Amino acid sequence: MSRASLDKDPHEVAAMFDGVSAGYDRANSVMTFGFDRRWRTTTSRVLDARRGERVLDLAAGTGVSTAEYARNGAWCLAADFSLGMLRSGKHRRVPMVAADALHLPFADESFDAATITFGIRNFVDTKAALEEIARVVKPGGRLVICEVSTPTFPPIRFLYRRFILWIMTLLGRFASSNPEAYTYLAESMLAWHDQRSLAQIIANAGWTKVEWLNLTFGVVAIHRAQKPTRRPDHHP
């Protein structure tokens, strides 16, 4: 399978990422002109993972984001459903596990925070995944999502939509081990929700205090939310 469809069959998506895993990080840096590093750094600051905390980095790919988020001493786990991506990141000193976002292999309330960096748009059911993530996060825990979004400045939005598919396809052909996969990735970017729509999906999945921060004119946005704390029991 060289390219997944926008129907996002999990097996197709996993196979596609297996196919691009060898040069995935390099291709991302080429296609974003190095901005991917800045976006991860900002996401790390928003996540604010600290020593003693357990953090789930879902759709972590090769673990490049996981290593970034663990720098302050938090225990960060890279989880992804592509074994090829995990294997390509095995040189990084972070724990890794194969996992499906809709059926996470973790106990309830296992993590202090969860994060997804450029991966949520590949989930087959966004709301169901966010509900499953809420299950494994402790009450009061944090959710941080970094994902492509909709540029807020009309001229930038026009250029983005007009040329992103062509640019990604061209650069993917030179920098990736599987150029066809990058056509899917570009199409998935254009079909993805805008900032407010994603915030609404997050809220509908049971998260509270949902807010977002635009990066690079809104080409990328970081969404942050909190799992509700339990209400105290009332006894007669």
Image (cartoon, grey):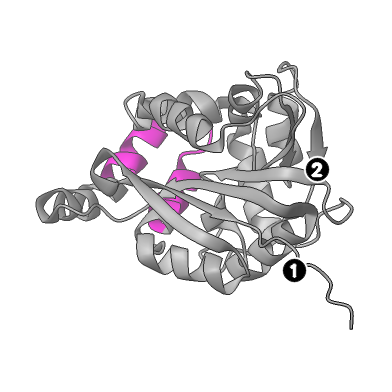
State the image quarter where residue 60 is shown: top right
Residue most extreme to the front? 236
Looking at the image, residue 117 lies above or below residue 197 = above
Q: How many marks?
A: 2
Q: Please tell me the numbered disc located at residue 162.
A: none
In magenta stretch: residue 53: no
- Tell me the kind of residue under disc 1: Arg
User: Which residue matches tag 2?
Assistant: 98
Q: Main secondary structure of the magenta part?
A: helix
The answer for how far apart the CA atoms under marks 1 and 2 are is: 34 Å
The foreground one among 13 and 231 is: 231
**To which residue does mark 1 refer?**
231
Residue pictured at 51% horizontal, 69% vertical: 201
Quarter assignment of residue 124: bottom right
Rendering coords of residue 139 (x, y %): 74, 56
Kind of residue at disc 2: Ala
Question: Which residue is drawn at the image coordinates 40% and 52% (left, top)?
Answer: 212
Name the image quarter holding residue 69: top right
Identity of the residue drawn at 62% across and 33% down: 21
Q: Is residue 93 left or right of residue 164?
A: right
| Side of 204 where 112 appears, left or right | right
Is 175 included in the stretch rendered in magenta? Answer: yes
Residue drawn at (46%, 53%) of the image: 184
Which structural element holds mark 2?
A: strand
x%, y% of residue 169? 35, 42
**Boundaries of the magenta span:** 166-187
